[in-house]
Amino acid sequence: DNNGVSQILDDQSAINVTLDTMANRSMRLIAIATSQQSVDPETKLLPNGLTLVGIVGLRDELRAESKPAVLKAQQAGIQVVMITGDRKETAHAIAKDVGLIERPDALVLTSTEIEDRTDAELKEIFPRLRVVARAYPHTKSRLVRIGQELGAVVGMTGDGVNDAAALKLADVGFAMGSGTEVAKEAGDIVILDDNFSSITRAILYGRTLFKSIRKFLVFQLTVNVAAILVAFLGPFFGFDLPLTVIQLLWINIIMDTLAGLAMSGEAALERYMQEPPIPRNEPIITKDMWSSILVNGPIVAAISLLFLTSHSIHNLFRPEAFLTAFFAFFVFINAFNTFNARTDRRNLFENILDNTGFLPVLGIIFTVQIVFTYVGGEVLRTVGLTLGEWLAVLILASIIIPIDLARKTLRDQLGTNTSTTP
């Protein structure tokens, strides 16, 4: 009591009310007691007859960035579940503070309540699960497995030895930088600052990288389709070798290397975190990407064949410079097509300056092609072009931009955009 005299505790309700009140304030609770007997410090069983001295409540203040990071993850279609060893009331209060419990049907369960459910029952409630309190190590692994069986890509965070199994089982294991070496070995990524916002940033950059890969695939496959069609159909229009082997090799080098560099610097835009996750079974090339490839590839080939066969276009160039002009045209039309490939939106210049390397790399492509036209000689089968001829090549090559704009406009009107490319 207040005088330091031990009293027999007949009614624990007042103690329980205090415990619940402290737990509901996001506190972790430690009960301090004394014993008249000698207690082995290694024992896991407490002796009877303990005298309760007091209860200590420990509260870790939430980081300022924690709640916005959780909100960002939820907006990105990511289900965030807090798994903790804390008691249910404490876990519920922390989850509420951080914004995990926003839905009225959100579930807060203990490991015991989860273990009482079958896998089928757990799968039914899994989408509403937000907090697991008093968690056991095997419960974490079970939840990871259930999420995967539901088709989700599961990420798991952890810092202790008991987390290792779940970290290893998860699709992506995030080990805390302050955690044990066992956890770090089991995880795929080590979060050095132990900050949840670092995970959301990793997701943003991962989505950006995936989109950049898709952009490059659209661009590169369009170039390949066009080159194959021109090489195959050219002889039927009287041109046995519209592009030489060396020219095709040169086109492949600059389009693979330099265009790849141009696409690789795309900015990580916050709007990517407003999109739902990509399903496991979604192909890397979507229907909209195929429409871009199978429309623009043949169109580039058709314009190229028109370039070769049109008398009006022939008259724009000197006879000895015509095939040189066609070589430059084929490079330039594919270079212009990078504007189409980098976004599936109709505004080709949206956020273009955020990719600081895009325009400089394109400038290098155009510059190198112009220089090699003059110095290529017999190796590249080129001769120098006049200023008027260069202007004609550029104007004809840029036609691919309004053509693809028309494709995107038609697609948007029909509502068939299934791409996740920006």
Image (cartoon, helix red, strand yellow):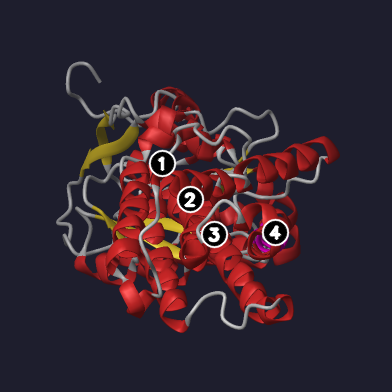
Residue located beneath label 2 in the image:
207
Q: Nearer the viewer, mark 4 or mark 2?
A: 4
Badge nearest the viewer, 3 or 1: 3
Q: Is residue 310 left or right of residue 86?
A: right
Q: Mark 4, mark 3: which one is toward the viewer?
A: 4
- Say which residue label 1 marks: 268
Q: Amino acid at mark 2?
A: Arg
- 319 or 120: nearer the viewer: 319
Return the x and y of residue 337 as percentages of the image width and height. Answer: 55, 51
User: Mark number for residue 219?
Assistant: 3
The amino acid type found where label 1 is placed reads Ala
Q: How many marks?
A: 4
Left or right: 262 as drawn, with respect to 308: left
- Answer whether residue 71 is magenta in the image: no
Q: Earlier in the sequence, mark 2 or mark 1?
A: 2
Q: Earlier in the sequence, mark 1 or mark 4?
A: 1
Q: Residues within 10 Å of mark 2 (few under 14, many from 20)?
A: many
Q: Secondary structure at mark 4?
A: loop
Q: Amino acid at mark 4?
A: Ser
Mark seen at residue 90: none
